[in-house]
Amino acid sequence: VVVVVVGVVVVFADMRRGSDRGFVEIGALFKSDFDKQVVLRTLERRGWQRTRGDDDEDWDLYWASVHTVRAIFNAENGRRLHEHQLVNHYPNHYELTRKDLMHRNIKRYRKEKEKHLEAAMHGDDRQPFSWPDEHELPQEWVPTTFALPSDYALFVEEFRRNPNVTWIAKPTGKAQGRGIFLVSKLNQLKKWAGGQAPSGQTLFREPYVVSRYIADPLLVGGKKFDMRMYVLVTNYRPLKAFLYRGGFCRFCVEQYSSDVAELDNVFVHLTNVAIQKHAEDYNDKTGGKWAYDDLLLFIESTRGIEARDKLVIEIEAVLAHSLKAVQSAIINDKHCFEMYGFDILLDSSLKPWLLEVNASPSLSTTTEDDRLMKMRLINDVIGLVYASRAVSAP
């Protein structure tokens, strides 16, 4: 599997187990409260042994849930990690993975970049400036978004300016499509404001974001899809990030329609596998997925090589600038790394839009190909994490 660097250029030598500067994996100890077979089996195949006790602090790697990581880095518990110990999340990973904070940080970053560009164009030497970037700043890569309930009045104002636009509402702290609904009429959000969901369930007291819905998605076979891209970050300062080429597309089961009558049909609009697998025509053999490389071949055959190459560059720019948007906010703890799951949607003009970033992208498997791909992913993550540490060691 080819792994490329996003945002920086790093060349790794061939790292062998037990090298004089490397990490000896045979007999290394890992701990996990995240019982996914692709993680456990991959580590065990690399020669790791699992510690079982809840109070056992003798471990080299902790593959933990985001809730456990919060406890690990809680200053009140007085815990200090040993030099050799690694954890699979940064303490405040949520700066990028919580939907409202992601939007806020990217919006701030864009404004700063544009301000510096404008100052440089007008000859203002007082402004720090680093343009042009290795990855050109996209014009826009996150749909217009409002945080609810705090931005409710602003959203109403925007809605009334563009009454024919469809919006998508998502809870800030949930995943796998839970709690998502489309909004085409303002009274649907008024129900939310009153604690009443369109379905009649009273579950909307929690924070939400509402984003402009991309109503003209690129379709393959008449069906909507989005892309899951995996990015590993081993350091934020300087930024060292790796893009996994084994990403994939997730398809809706039913044909896409922007008809208002279909707005409540999750099998048309929401690509989450956790939702689509309940559709009557769900394909158990493919899992409703398509390899990223297959998508690039499709685009090459339908739009041309130049369009394909341009798309690859633009996707990498979205990934790189999203990471840079939180670079100053993330606590760059030397004990941490992060494997993000970026969800990207292409519109009909092949423009990539960032929908959200997952701190714990699903490692459940739906097919044998899916299982093998995710085992290769975890294997590469572990290898790169320890290779990075060996390279940076004094």
Image (tube, rainbow, N blue to C red):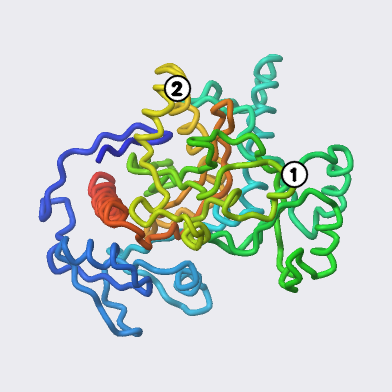
Q: Which three-letter amino acid code belongs to the residue tagged 1?
A: Thr
User: In which quadrant of the rendered view does residue 345 lie?
Assistant: top right
Work out whether residue 129 or residue 272 is closer to the camera in this orientation and state it.
Answer: 272
The structure residue drawn at horizontal position 61% and vertical position 55%, both measured from the top left corner, is 266
User: Which residue is nearer to you in this view: 359 or 73?
Assistant: 359
Residue 89 is tagged as none
Q: Residues within 10 Å of mark 1 (few under 14, many from 20)?
A: some
Horizontal side of residue 331 vs 204, given as left or right: left
Q: Which residue is mark 2?
A: 302
Q: Position of residue 112 (x, y in %)?
A: 66, 34
Horizontal side of residue 152 vs 111, given as left or right: right
Between disc 1 and disc 2, whose residue precedes?
Answer: 1
Q: Which of 312/136 is in front?
A: 312
The image quarter containing residue 364 is bottom left
Counting other residues with Cα less than 10 Å from the Cα at mark 2, is it few (<14), some (14-19), or many (20 or more)? few
How far across and down, in percent of the image, does residue 343 sit? 51, 46
Quadrant of the image containing the N terminus = top left
Q: Is residue 228 something one can see in this rendering?
A: yes
- Residue placed under numbered mark 1 in the picture: 166
Compared with 314, 197 (above or below) is below
**Residue 389's x, y, as percent?**
27, 51
Amino acid bearing label 2 = Thr
